[in-house]
Image (cartoon, rainbow, N blue to C red):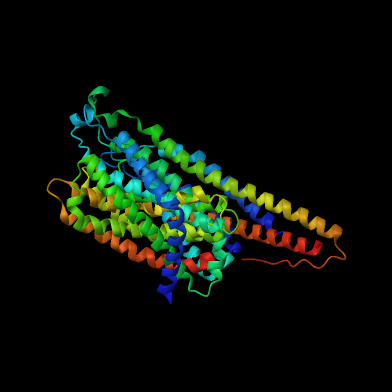
Amino acid sequence: MFFRTALLVLRKDFAIEIKSFELVSTTLFFAVGCVVVFAFALVSFAGEAAAAGRKPEDAAAAILWIALLFAGTLALGRTFERERYGETIRALLLAPAPRPALYVGKLLGILCLLGLTELLLVPLIALLFNAPLLTQLTLLLPLLVFGTVGFAAVGTLFAAMLMRARTRDVMLPILLYPITIPVIIAGVRGTSALLTSPRDEPTAIMWLAILVCFDVVFVTLSLWTFEPLMTE
Amino acid sequence: MKGSATRIMMRRVAGAAIALLLSVPLFAFQPSAGQESFKAVPIDQIPPTEQLPAAPLLIAAYAFAWIAVFFYVWTVWRRLNKVETEMRALERRQSHRGEGAPGVNRTSLP
Amino acid sequence: MKKLFVPLTIVTAALFAYAPVAIAGAPYESTMLLVQKIFYFHVPSWMGMYSAIAVCGGASAVHLFKNRPAADRLAVSAAELAVMFGAIGLVTGPLWGRKAWGVWWSWDVRTDMAFLMWLVFVAYLLVRTYGGPGSDKLAAAMGLFGTAVSPFVYVSVNIWRTVHPLNTVVPELIGGSMPGAGLPFAVSSFAFLLLFALLLALRVNLASRQAVLDELYLAEEDGAA
């Protein structure tokens, strides 16, 4: 019953999205725009940076995760904005389904969207920065998966609970970013460990372990608190 | 009235804190026992961290701590005053309107 | 709780009166001399902030799951105090560090974690103030999640830091090379913890008075209707 409900919610979101592709196309394009902005802002290929020994590849890990963070924040806001606008959230809450199942359904939707974004961003960044990301997939994929799950778990909960708040657009990043700093640190440092020339596997695995712990704790916490937060 | 006991107490806190603020610089500057005699060195030959005078930083740190505490106590006092004023106004309105109005349930909270 | 106001104030005031005497009487630390005396207010203010965070986290959890307004009042009071004590720590720290180690911010794990926890509770107050109706539950979730994330912040910043080359090292001061620091440090710590308890009681009292006022307003509307 639980997972059926969650999958039903996911299918509902898919069905809406397939009609217009609004969320997918805007999120993807925003992520690409982020990457471009950060690339121009942070990276210099010649002159002072080269003299200081800073390689462009170091920026690749940071830009990947920050673009994901920003795109994810916007996607979270707009997913629930859709629910609020159509006033479907009341219908969802009235349905005789376990509330945490609604949360899981929404979480799966966000994960799919962010997964698509990563599918686009990883090759793009590998291309732009000559970063050997695609050769590191055995460790990079788990890092991305667990990092995205951690971010999306807290993000879905906060976006859902802020749905009826007044200043919901700016409140989501204000509340979300301090809580997901460990995810960002672990993701960026883990990815960057994979990109160093003799790749640093133990470090990447250690950061992966931290991400897994974070996911376990915060998915549990979110499932636990979804019910009391949505009975408003 | 419950509120004025709080206000009196807050005045006492403020008074004690003012006395302490004025006394700290007096005490903090006294040198402690057991210092050896110092060799004189020209100021541009000592490391950069030593070239900064410590006293302004120390005073600024303690001053900020006291000012922050004071500021917070003041904001709590201001809000408490506002609440008490509104409560008195409300009670006056009740008693003016009052004889026929249903009894107001005065809940007392911890 | 109210009966403790006067004795608490007297003891706190006495401790704060003695503290400068004790601090001045403490021996100078060998390398940092006078500016190290900021430490006697700096560390206790962090102790105050972490106590406030623990109280806020617990009270937030209780309010979120048991829906008790008294827990909510305690949580918001503790959050305000966490921000206040944290601000004291965040200002006194760089003032000390600039003189002692030459840099305003050394990216030490303890300073980073304290800064991040401070940000979490500033966010708590922001959502409380600007979140509109129902923001008490939202803020309670933020308080709970913020307290839950603190070990992760510590671990990740600690490992992040050890991988990076450091330009300064923050030495251990408590129980280290300063035998005479025990008494003034104990006096200051105790004074700050008592100040925390006192301010918490004050602020909770304000919150409960506000709640009484709200109930009076509601009763008036019901009476007039």
Query: Which residue is drawn at the image coordinates 13% and 45% (left, top)?
Result: A197
Left or right placement of residue B32 versus residue A89 in this view: left
- Res A13 seen here: yes
| Residue lying furthest front | A19
Q: Residue at x 65, y 57 (%)?
A: C210
* Count of numbered labels shown in the rendering: 0
Q: Is residue A173 above or below residue A49?
A: below
Instruction: Tell whether C219 sits left or right of A157.
Output: right
- Find the residue positioned furthest to the bottom: A1
Note whether A95 is above or below A156 in the view shown.
Answer: below
**Quick one: quadrant of the C terminus of chain B?**
bottom right
The picture places residue A89, in percent across and down from the top left corner, at 54, 63
Q: Can you name the residue that lies furthest to the right here?
A: B100
Question: Which residue is at the front of the view, A57 or B97?
Answer: A57
Q: In the picture, which quadrant includes the N terminus of chain B?
A: bottom right
Residue A100, percent across and down? 45, 70
Q: Position of residue C128 (x, y in %)?
A: 55, 53
A27 lies left or right of A63: right
- The image position of residue C167, as x and y in percent, is 23, 39
Q: Against A15, is A166 above or below?
A: above
Answer yes or no: is residue C146 visible.
Answer: no
A68 or C87: nearer the eye? Answer: A68
